Image (cartoon, grey):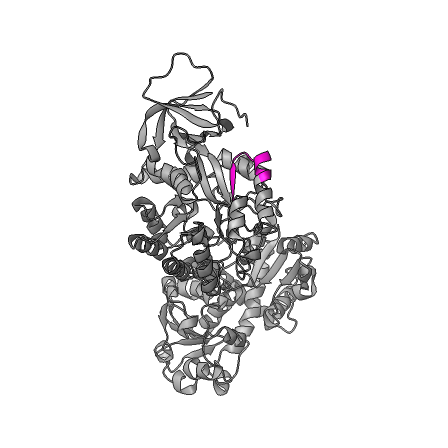
């Protein structure tokens, strides 16, 4: 297929063949990562700016490494140290950076839709690296890739996603990526954090951890934001952990060859027991590894690397 | 003297819907002549209203003129010009100016400025509480003497039930009206859109319908407790309409309004993070839209008011959750209301009630809302069939925050006459002289 997309704002409008195309590209990128010298000149002379309005070490680092492996110049612009705190508007900030002529802006922002808004006002490409509770498309793609590697397919698998569904951009991207690929998605967590409306996205909602995990092929645990507790979504971390944390006993209900995923960072002993996090069934570090390859693929495709290569 | 000749005269107060002519003189309706019988010689200007509807001057009981304090968004001049262009002769302006209209001096200065430069009658609504802070009542009687027609902290709810009770009880002694921005602000929380599928999908924090309905229910119960009159502003939910209907059936002194966007749009309009579809209360679900429509049809909802809320570009050109609430509405309210006729359940006289007679009755505006002999010479001529496109460059307001640009609309104010003077005209040979 021909890659025509200028921005990756979300997976909401991604077709199956586009997702497959990104995964195929990621696969060839992964080959680069097995080499002794893990760097190709594909994006030499291109500049990617990581424009982060929200703290994130792993996603930013993953994009940074991805860019550098492709020989792009990667610059980090973190809003915490910028004039944003003095009241510069998002649009002004983006226009300032755009005036420095980057090719790609990788944007993380606490407000849902911020990358969509920017894409209407700047001329460079934009990759959404997480916007509010909306989407985290590179995570949705890397989760898809990780599951494909672990299971060989996605269609027909029972995938349980457990935790704070309400505020999770990872879930919203996964509903598109895994959902569109034919997975049977189950969403679970305390009822205050799992809106029933999510069933309209084609997922099943349950508040019973055992029902969600039973016969699952993949159990994806979400990080519980410890600061959510102050708005009383659940009574205590202790109760949360007992009712919605993944333990050996609960995980034993899943299929024998089930795998565990987590977008990170993990709260050990809260949503995931210590031993499971390090178990053979855990694919958490594979997710991080796939992440670099998927982000290389996205940068490569958006920077026109595809055309250059052919 | 001005003769409006041979139009369809629609005046629900005098139970009139027929071809006729109206004579205006010295700022009043001097005469009504039914049918085509018009004086052979007429010593004055004649407007041929054939094919037009002749309505009592439209009244918008809910606008934000942003004056004083935010004149770059709107001022009394631009806001009333926008009103005139939309067919409105009168507007009631909310108190959330800077300073807040909580003092007779401010009410007086709004009235004076409006008298000098307004292209429409401006009726100030004063705050219920000082600074709209919800703690101390404003001087209701003095504010009313200075020209306040009602009291509202619109933009914010009166959070305390006790405060609202006292306000209703105190207002009752002077027969004054409280307008309620019904919202449980804590329940609405950080919400930026209607809590429903669209907001969940877009990852936008939701405002549940209950945040509005709890407050409507509370205010109805407080009206019952106090015997004071209350008017519920910008009703947007199904249960909100149901509560109002129930209150009216119990004979409580309660009225309510909705805005054109609530019966025209749903929360689907926020798709793409469209900040021009962001308002408070938020655009709701289709079932809510249908219920608002039902409330307009069965008489539960008394008035259509725009909640005209001008905002400069930069508070709308930003992240959705950070964007300001509200849209301009004065120039689109009439055609969006006329679109209700298509269902056949809302008649032209009902439109005249919703946009003129009822707001005049609720706010007790003397001489307004009717075309009977002796009424003020406020007339809106409507071309019900003209098709036109609402374009950004034609807007008379200073602000451009509307979700309706590019819409093909049907029906429009052909001319607006206020106190016998023409404040707006699209009719050949009829020129503005106000």
- Residue lying at 40% horizontally and 39% vertically, measured from the top left: B355
State which quarter of the image contains the C terminus of chain B.
Answer: top right
Numbered-mark total = 0
Vertical comparison of A249 with A26: above or below: below
- Tell me: residue B110, above or below residue A211: above
Numbered range of the magenta stretch: B112-124
Q: Tell me where residue A163 sits by quadrant.
A: bottom left
Say which of A45 and A60 sits in front. Answer: A60
The spot of residue B420 in percent (x, y) is: 48, 27
Residue B122 part of the magenta segment:
yes
Residue A62, given in percent of the width and then of the height, sits at 60, 69
- Give the image location of residue B301, x and y in percent: 36, 48
In the image, is residue A249 above or below residue B428? below
Name the residue rendered at 62%, 48% in the picture. Answer: B69
Residue B424 appears anywhere in the view: yes
Magenta span includes B237: no
| In-image side of A12 versus A60 (left or right) | left
Do we see residue B117 in this rendering? no
């Amino acid at each position: 297929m021909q890659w025509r997309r200028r921005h990756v704002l979300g997976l909401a409008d991604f077709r199956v063949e586009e997702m497959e195309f990104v995964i195929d590209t990621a696969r060839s990128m992964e080959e680069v990562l097995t080499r002794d010298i893990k760097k190709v000149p594909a994006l030499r002379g291109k500049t990617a700016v990581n424009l982060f309005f929200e703290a994130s070490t792993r996603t930013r680092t993953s994009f940074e490494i991805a860019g550098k492996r492709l020989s792009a110049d990667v610059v980090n612009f973190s809003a915490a140290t910028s004039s944003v705190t003095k009241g510069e508007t998002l649009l002004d900030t983006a226009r300032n950076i755009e005036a420095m002529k980057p090719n790609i802006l990788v944007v993380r922002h606490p407000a849902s839709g911020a990358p969509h808004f920017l894409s209407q006002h700047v001329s460079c490409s934009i990759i959404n690296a997480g916007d509010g509770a909306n989407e985290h498309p590179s995570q949705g793609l890397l989760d898809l890739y990780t599951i494909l590697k672990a299971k060989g397919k996605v269609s027909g698998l029972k995938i349980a996603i457990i935790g704070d569904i309400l505020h999770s951009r990872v879930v919203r991207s996964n509903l598109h990526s895994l959902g569109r690929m034919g997975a049977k998605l189950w969403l679970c967590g305390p009822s205050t954090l799992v809106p029933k409306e999510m069933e309209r996205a084609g997922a099943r909602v349950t508040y019973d951890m055992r029902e969600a995990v039973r016969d699952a092929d993949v159990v994806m645990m979400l990080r519980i934001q410890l600061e959510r507790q102050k708005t009383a979504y659940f009574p205590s971390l202790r109760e949360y952990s007992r009712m919605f944390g993944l333990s050996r006993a609960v995980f034993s209900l899943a299929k024998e060859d089930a795998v565990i995923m987590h977008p990170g960072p993990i709260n050990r002993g809260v949503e995931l027991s210590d031993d499971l996090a390090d178990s053979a069934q855990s694919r958490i570090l594979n997710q991080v590894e796939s992440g670099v390859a998927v982000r290389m693929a996205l940068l490569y495709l958006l920077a026109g690397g595809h055309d250059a290569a052919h | 003297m001005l003769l409006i000749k041979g139009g369809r005269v629609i005046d629900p107060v005098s139970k009139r819907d027929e071809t006729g002519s109206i004579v205006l003189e010295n700022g009043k309706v001097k005469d009504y002549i039914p049918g085509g019988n018009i004086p052979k010689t007429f010593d004055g200007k004649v407007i041929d209203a054939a094919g037009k509807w002749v309505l009592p001057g439209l009244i918008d009981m809910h606008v934000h003129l942003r004056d004083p304090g935010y004149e770059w968004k709107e001022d009394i001049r631009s806001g009333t010009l926008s009103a005139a262009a939309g067919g409105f002769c009168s507007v009631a302006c909310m108190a959330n100016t800077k300073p807040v209209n909580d003092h007779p001096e401010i009410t007086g200065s709004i009235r004076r400025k409006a008298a000098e430069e307004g292209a429409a009658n401006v009726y100030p609504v004063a705050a219920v509480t000082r600074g709209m802070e919800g703690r101390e009542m404003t001087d209701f009687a003095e504010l009313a003497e200075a020209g306040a027609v009602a009291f509202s902290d619109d933009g914010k709810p009166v959070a305390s039930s006790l405060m609202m009770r006292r306000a209703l009880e105190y207002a009752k002694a002077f027969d004054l009206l409280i307008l309620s921005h019904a919202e449980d602000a804590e329940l609405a929380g950080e919400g930026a859109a209607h809590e429903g599928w669209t907001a969940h999908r877009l990852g936008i924090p939701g405002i549940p319908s209950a945040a509005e309905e709890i407050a409507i229910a509370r205010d109805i119960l407080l009206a019952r407790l106090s015997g004071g009159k209350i008017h519920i502003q910008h009703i947007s939910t199904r249960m909100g309409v149901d509560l109002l209907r129930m209150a009216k059936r119990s004979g409580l002194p309660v009225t309510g309004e909705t805005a054109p966007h609530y019966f025209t749009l749903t929360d689907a309009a926020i798709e793409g993070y469209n900040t021009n579809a962001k308002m408070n209360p938020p655009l709701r679900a289709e079932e809510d839209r249908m219920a608002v429509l039902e409330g307009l049809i069965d008489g539960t909802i008394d008035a259509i008011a725009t909640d005209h809320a001008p905002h400069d570009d930069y508070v709308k050109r930003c992240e959705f959750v950070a964007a300001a609430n509200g849209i301009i509405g004065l120039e689109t309210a009439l055609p969006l209301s006329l679109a209700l006729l298509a269902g056949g359940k809302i008649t032209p006289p009902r439109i005249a009630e919703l946009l003129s007679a009822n707001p005049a009755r609720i706010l007790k505006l003397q001489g307004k809302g009717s075309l009977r002999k002796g009424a003020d010479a406020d007339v809106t001529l409507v071309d019900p069939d003209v098709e036109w496109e609402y374009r950004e460059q034609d807007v008379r307001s200073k602000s451009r925050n509307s979700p309706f640009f590019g819409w093909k609309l049907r029906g429009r104010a052909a001319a607006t006459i206020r106190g016998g003077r023409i404040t707006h005209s699209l009719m050949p040979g009829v020129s503005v002289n106000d």
